[in-house]
Structure formats: C-alpha cells, structure tokens
Image (spheres, helix red, strand yellow):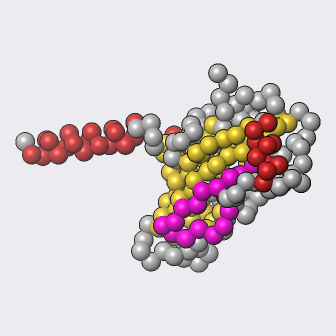
Amino acid sequence: MRKRVSVIIYIGILLYLTLSPGNAFAQYNSSKNPATLGSPVKSMVELGSVYSSIYDITVTLLETVRGKDAMTRLKKADTNNPKPPKGFEYVLARVKFGMKARAVSDKLTFDLGDSPLQWSALSSDLIEYPRVSVTVPAPPLKGTLNPGAFAEGWIAFAVDTGDGRPVMVFDPDSGGATGRGKTLFFEMFRDE
C-alpha cells in the first residue's frame, strides 16, 4: 500500500512539473511554440575546452516594449540612438538569465550579451531580422556570469512594423560555450 501511494505521488509531481504553465522546458520550446512572456525556459550550456561541464540555464522574457515607447526609452538612454530603418520599429526586451552548475567543482563563467549571435529576432515567418547597434536602457543584458548567479537587463531589436508576432531567440552556443542545449524561442508580441 505504501509503495502504491509513493508511485501515485511521484506520478502526480511529474505531471505537475511537465504540465505547469510557468515552466517551459526546452524540449517543448520551438519557433512554432515559443515561450510566453514571464515563462521561464530551462536549457543548458556546455563550458570548457578540455574537460567540459554542463551548466543549467533558465531564461525568462520579463517585459517587452515596442514602437514609440521603445524609441522614447532608447532616446532617454542615449540621445544619439538613431531612428529605426524605414518600415521598422524598435523592440526592447527585458530578460532574466540564470546559470547553475551541476557539480560543486564547476566554476567556469559564461559571457552574456557580448556575442552578436546570442540574441536575435525572427519575423513571424521565421526570417532573421538584421541586428541593430543602439544603447539600451540601463541595465543592459551583458557581462560575465558565474555559476549560481543571474543577470537581468535590456536588449534591443528592430522588427517590421507590420509583424504582429516577432520571436526573440537565444542561441546557447555562444558566450564561450563549447557545446549547447537547444536554441530557445520567446514570443515578443501577439496580435490579438
């Protein structure tokens, strides 16, 4: 009887973890099924050149600002920030990024936000938008992350003004990673 109760509890916990809307695991995250605003997505990065170690990461898109509001914030951050190209508008994304070592001896760091390939935006038909170089509001999402730490900050994109469903992408094969988890996708906006 005790064994049966334990199995039922185990199955219940497993179902809760896999079906809970607050946790999107990387295997269910895709360009066709991007994480929604506020949903943490878990994956991993592999660091180290000779003896590599796997670190768990959690990425959460906390907030997005688009169009006029994004331009106002960019101008406040730096008056020299240019207007977006014709037919485009800026999107600012505030992201929380956490990294955890799997072993106590794992002490490698991850460079966040410095790689041009880490963060990108895709159109609703999955074509990558050109990168932009602007000064984002403080704090920017960048720096060196130690195991057990997290960073939170802003990144910027330019998307087509008519695109109602752009997607933010994080590529874990960056920031000094030698191996990778799955590329992660986040829904920046949804046309209602």
The residue that appears at 52% across and 47% down in the rendered structure is: 41
The residue lying toward the viewer, choosing from 153 and 127, is 153
Residue 142 pos. (x, y %)? 68, 62
- State the extent of the magenta-drawn residues as a range: 141-159
Question: Magenta-highlighted stretch: main secondary structure?
Answer: strand
Please state the horizontal and vertical placement of residue 140, each as a whole percent of the image.
Answer: 69, 58
User: Toward which corner of the image does residue 111 lie, by quadrant?
Assistant: bottom right
Q: Is residue 24 above or below residue 32?
A: below
Q: Tell me the residue at 45%/43% (across/down).
A: 23
- Of residue 184 and residue 132, the one placed in the foreground of this image is 132
The image position of residue 133, as x and y in percent, is: 84, 54
* Image vertical order of residue 29 relative to residue 162, above or below: below
Q: Is residue 116 left or right of residue 7?
A: right
Residue plotted at (77% across, 30% down): 163
**Which quadrant of the rendered structure holds the N terminus?**
top left
In the orientation shown, which residue stands out farthest toward the top? 192
